[in-house]
Image (cartoon, rainbow, N blue to C red):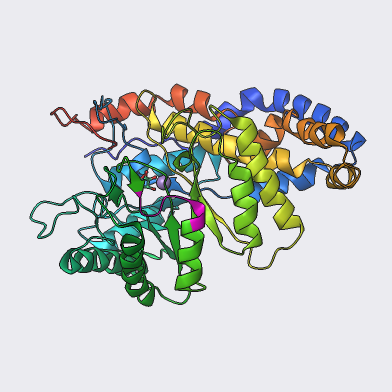
Amino acid sequence: MAANFEIEQDFIAEQNKAKRDWLAEDFEYLHKKLRRRRVDIEAIVEKVRGLKIAVPSWGVGTGGTRFARFPSAGEPRGIYEKLEDCSTINKLVRSTPAVSLHIPWDKPDDVGNLVAAAKGYGLEFDAMNSNTFQDQPGQKNSYKFGSLSHEDAATRKQAIEHNVDCISIGKKIGSKALTVWVGDGSNFAGQSNFRLALERYLDSMREIYASVPDDWRLFIEHKFFEPAFYSSVINDWGTSYFCARELGPKASCLVDLGHHAPNVNIEQIVSRLIQFHKLGGFHFNDSKYGDDDLDAGSVKPFQLFLIFNELVDAELSNVPGFDPSYMLDQSHNVTDPIESLVASAIEVSRAYAQACLVDRAKLREAQVNGDAIVALATLKEAFTTDVSPILAAARERDSGAIDPINVYRTSGYRSKKSKERPAQMGISAGII
Ligand code: LRH
Ligand code: MN
């Protein structure tokens, strides 16, 4: 049986040949421009090479909404094909060497096989994600009215055990974190007692916390609405922060950009969590209205830059314990998921590179002098700098593609996969 098609390193190198001279020209131009700002372009390239962003296993399949999902040909049918696509993304951008699994969607039949397959693809496993927002076939207690905060102790116990199970799988595959997002909440005023619901959630999380290994992290992910449409138990960063503090040092807050009401100042929330030493990590995506899970940097690139401006400021200020984990969490309803994840990983690296260009001394001086015009202009100077040559150079130096989307399309990967992966019939809706 012919081996599955994969994009070979030689093919990427071959394709890069055609773009190398242009890149050198653009890089030299930017080099001169940054030198005038006393910025060492090589230092920025090295910083970008060090930025790693985890890819969500559920992001390589076509996503959908509650109305419909329109699967595309050649999409992955199981965890092994998802890993194959994740390795293709990393081959092209070289910044996504880790995959985040969602249980039970990715529950492995054979953990050994899964670890071996990931190793073969040069991939590691990032945070585990539990799922107590859907009922599984044969499940004893339904999560219709909540999970970790459910009124019924048996249902809470079931949800706790599921999270503990996620940790035990994670330990076997080398993961070092568990992300807990619950859809718990209410749709009507009076349906839930806010204080008691949070108390029950905390009690459940204390039991899960007790099972978290000492070298692991427990991420609490807040979300202001959906699937609950009146109240959510972990609705905002304040509640998440309180819970992380209550639980202990292994617990911290995960910021999914789409989990905030429109116009909320997310970069300020990030600076708060940094200052309070409880910033655990991110689910990067973008949105215009709700939790749209659109491609990172595709709607509000300036916000993404401002978030990285806070992160770089913390990095340069050596904030103790500052070590946020970066992950994409998106739903690709109308694009090839691999192209969207490639583009999104690049946009996250772009925001980081731009934030590294901020003239911090000039910004601080403007702040001290109350000079808002120069303060904003100092940020805009960095944000409006086209760092594409730096990003491409960083990819190429790690054997990635100078022009990843073009290499991906030229390879014919998706059409070859559509032959290798006969489509599974059946209409479906929902995010995966
Ligand atoms: C909830 C969420 C969470 C995941 C799910 C797939 O909206 O962001 O992080 O478990 O999406
Ligand atoms: Mn998320």
* Residue 379 falls within the magenta-colored stretch: no
Query: Residue 355's image quarter?
Result: top right
Q: Who is closer to the viewer here, 240 or 209?
A: 240
Say whether residue 347 is left or right of residue 389: left
- Tell me how many marks there are: 0
* Residue 233 falls within the magenta-colored stretch: yes
Query: In the image, residue 49 lies at what x, y percent?
Result: 65, 47
Query: In the image, residue 294 lies at what x, y percent?
Result: 45, 31
Query: In the image, residue 211 lies at what x, y percent?
Result: 35, 75
Q: Farthest residue in the front direction? A: 190
Query: Residue 126's image quarter?
Result: bottom left
Residue in view at x 31 percent, y 49 percent:
183
Residues in magenta, as a range: 232-238
Residue in view at x 29 percent, y 32 percent:
75
Q: Who is closer to the viewer here, 50 or 100?
A: 100
**Relative to 428, is 44 above or below?**
below
Residue in view at x 51 percent, y 56 percent:
238
Can residue 318 be seen at all in this image of the molecule?
Answer: yes
Can residue 397 be seen at all in this image of the molecule?
Answer: no
Residue in view at x 28 percent, y 62 percent:
148
